[in-house]
């Protein structure tokens, strides 16, 4: 394998195959990266989003940081309500965040 090519695992029809993605195509994508999500860029280049992220990180391209959506106090409240059998959707609605955010924050907190 030449140094400017990377093997990229992809999944199609339930079978793992290898697809090659040149760094030059990812470099072209690096300029577009600021306007596209990793998923959109991966679909365009027909590769895995983690591969795009790895190439961009290797080139030193800065990525947008996902900021935490809830405060520590909000997580404590959510954990208490979850232990009291409230649903994630109900908790999320009252704290003005999505149920998936509640699930992720409780997971990170070990609740």
Image: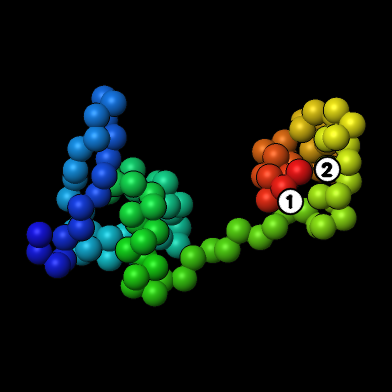
Which residue is label 2 attached to? 79
Quadrant position of the C terminus in the picture: top right
* SS for dot 2: helix
- Report which quarter residue 95 is drawn in: top right
Q: Is residue 91 left or right of residue 19?
A: right
Q: Quadrant of residue 56?
A: bottom left
68 over 42 or under it: above or below: below
What x and y, as percent, mark residue 11?
29, 35
Q: Residue at x 41, y 71 (%)?
A: 61
Q: Is residue 15 above or below residue 97?
A: above
Residue placed at 49% from the left, 65% from the top?
63
The answer to whether residue 86 is left or right of residue 10 is right
- What is the crowding at mark 1: few (fewer than 14 residues within 10 Å), some, or many (at least 20)? few
Which residue occupies 79% across, 38% down? 92
Residue drawn where x is 24% and y is 49% of the image = 8
Q: Position of residue 5 (x, y in %)?
A: 16, 60
Task: Give the CA distance from mark 1 to mark 2.
Answer: 9 Å
Is mark 1 in CB contact (under 8 Å) with mark 2?
yes
Quarter of the image where one finds residue 3: bottom left
Q: Give the residue pinned by disc 1.
A: 109
């Amino acid at each position: 394998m030449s140094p400017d090519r990377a093997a990229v695992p992809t999944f199609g029809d339930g079978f793992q195959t290898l697809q090659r993605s040149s760094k030059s195509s990812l470099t072209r994508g690096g300029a577009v990266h600021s306007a596209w999500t990793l998923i959109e860029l991966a679909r365009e280049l027909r590769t895995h989003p983690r591969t795009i992220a790895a190439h961009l990180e290797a080139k030193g391209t800065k990525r947008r940081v996902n900021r935490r959506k809830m405060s520590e106090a909000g997580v404590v409240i959510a954990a208490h309500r979850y232990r009291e059998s409230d649903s994630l959707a109900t908790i999320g609605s009252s704290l003005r965040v999505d149920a998936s955010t509640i699930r992720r924050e409780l997971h990170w907190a070990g609740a």
